[in-house]
Amino acid sequence: MLIFFLTLLNPLLAQEQASLPAPTLSYLKGSEFQHLMGSLMGKEYGYTKAQLAEIGGQSVAEYILYLSRIDVPLKRVIFIIGQDFSGSSYQNGYFGLAAARYLAQRKVEVDVVLLYPNDPLRSRLAMQCKSHSATLHFDILQNLQEQLNVQMTKNILANWLNDYDLVVDAITLSSIEQPKTPVREFMHAFSEVNKKVLAINLPVGWHTDNGNLYNVYVPQFVISLGLPLKAIKEFEGQHAIGGRFIPQANTFNYVLPKYKIEDSFHLLQK
């Protein structure tokens, strides 16, 4: 009797599984994303850090130009460039610097804040930004304090950022539970700015897997490069994906976005 019942049940289970919708896009844990980036730079795929920066940075820049066309023109854009942990296979700041240079080449007024000393690739990208008339800022917290002769607060930093039409958070690809200076000051200032904020891959202060776990700022826009982190799955703002560096026939079996042939980014529908 049991065998007869299982025989009837199996086709029903198979039919139910077949009717389930196929996943439309893969969302990655932070460790999976770092493994992906490391693999792309390995022997099988052969990318360099600079190539990934160029592909991702172009997507970010073109998305910003798209935002400028559909809404208020974004004439002044500021990028906040951080640095990921030494164990990370990739730095979010590379994407931000390449995007800043692309915009500067297109005559957008671009400022770049570098929160940490540069490694060789960051130095080259920053030099390229400067050669295209982008303004570079080092030790910005100390400089603002000296200029204004006041103790730095999140409101003072937010007021400075409000001079720009768009603030781009390119600080980190890592979960930071208790950020230190200068990341902490910018994370708090982002929640106070009156202008729009775009986060690349991960808003600073968010957990890569669990999202806004620590209840910090929420950007208006996020652009994920390659594939999105699980943190962004419940994000309610406008979410784009770019960085077309993962081969369609990838060995990870990830589900990739469906780009139009000519597009470098894709808008995700809620």
Image (cartoon, rainbow, N blue to C red):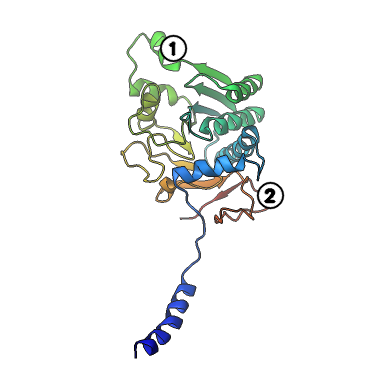
Left or right: where 253 falls relative to 131: left
The location of residue 24, given as percent across then percent down, is 52, 59
The location of residue 92, given as percent across then percent down, is 51, 33
Q: Nearer the viewer, residue 17 or 243?
A: 17
User: Residue, x 54% and y 20% (percent of image)?
Assistant: 118
Numbered mark located on residue 175 in the image: none
Residue at which label 2 appears:
262
For marks 1 and 2 on the same chain, the one whose residue lies earlier in the sequence? 1
Left or right: where 6 falls relative to 38: left
Q: Is residue 215 above or below residue 254?
A: above
SS type, badge 2: loop
How many numbered marks, from 0 up? Answer: 2
Category of crowding for the residue at label 1, using alpha-carbon neighbours closer than 10 angstroms: few (below 14), some (14–19), many (at least 20): few
User: Residue, x 50% and y 40% (percent of image)?
Assistant: 34
Amino acid carrying label 2: it is: Glu
- In which quadrant is the N terminus drawn? bottom left
The location of residue 5, given as percent across then percent down, is 37, 87
Residue at which label 1 appears:
143
- In which quadrant is the C terminus drawn? bottom left
The location of residue 107, given as percent across then percent down, is 64, 27
Q: Is residue 237 visible?
A: no
